[in-house]
Image: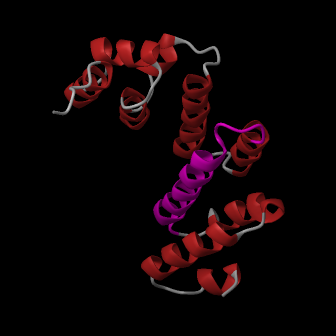
Amino acid sequence: MNIDGIVQNPDEHVRFTAYLDQLQQVADTDEVDLVGRVLTDPDQTMAQSAVLRHLDRRATDLHTGPVYEGWAQAMAHATIGRPFLAQRLREWSLFRAFTLKLPWQPDDLLASSNWLQLKTAAGTNTEATEILAEAGRTKRIRNTARASLNPRSES
């Protein structure tokens, strides 16, 4: 089913699943166009949710590699006017900085979403984890960071 056929389906659950399928199969050269077309769906909550899943899946695969920056810029352009999607892309770039030990600012981490703080608290960047153990937004984030810093030996 092509994207035009998907939009015609009145059931947003069917469209959501179809969008995810199309996004998973899209060629790199057509990705920006497809993301833009998904975001024209009248149900913006559903459309942005489908694109968010796509961004997370792709960023998971790309964030440690050299093509990430170009991809993130292209996706930022495709998602203009969608603050939540733009924030997620910025946070993936921050997570990339933690992972690759690139420069980053503690204030950016502390201002980030619970999603990024929790993802980072469970990670391997000791500096970021220490900051979150002390000043993470929620008790769960602080506890996760502390557990990452002091893993119990399993006996």
Q: Is residue 14 above or below residue 92?
A: below
Q: Quadrant of the C terminus?
A: top left
82 left or right of 66?
Answer: left
Q: Position of residue 51 (x, y in %)?
A: 57, 58
Instruction: Describe residue 60's horizontal placement relative to residue 30 as left or right.
Output: left
Tell me if residue 82 can be seen.
Answer: no
**Colour scheme in use:** secondary structure
**Nearer to the camera, 39 or 95:** 95
Q: Position of residue 12 (x, y in %)?
A: 46, 77
Q: Position of residue 94 (x, y in %)?
A: 57, 27
Q: Is residue 77 visible?
A: yes
Q: Nearer the viewer, residue 23 or 61?
A: 61
In the image, taking residue 5 as reference, residue 91 lies left or right, namely left
Residue 45 magenta-highlighted: yes
Prevailing secondary structure of the magenta residues? helix
Q: How many marks?
A: 0
Measured as percent of width and height from the top left, residue 43 is found at 50, 68
Location of residue 26 with respect to 141 vertically, above or below: below
Q: Which residue is more in the foreground, 89 or 95?
A: 95
Q: Residue at x 54, y 33 (%)?
A: 91
In the picture provided, is 54 more to the left or to the right than 74? left
* The N terminus lies in quadrant: bottom right
Q: Report which quarter residue 112 is drawn in.
A: top left
- The residue at 53%/63% (across/down) is 50
Residue numbers of the magenta segment: 43-67
Q: Is residue 117 magenta?
A: no
Question: What residue appears at the point 62 percent right and 52 percent down from the top-left corner?
Answer: 58
Residue situated furthest left in the rendering: 155
- Residue beneath the point at 48% across and 59% down: 49
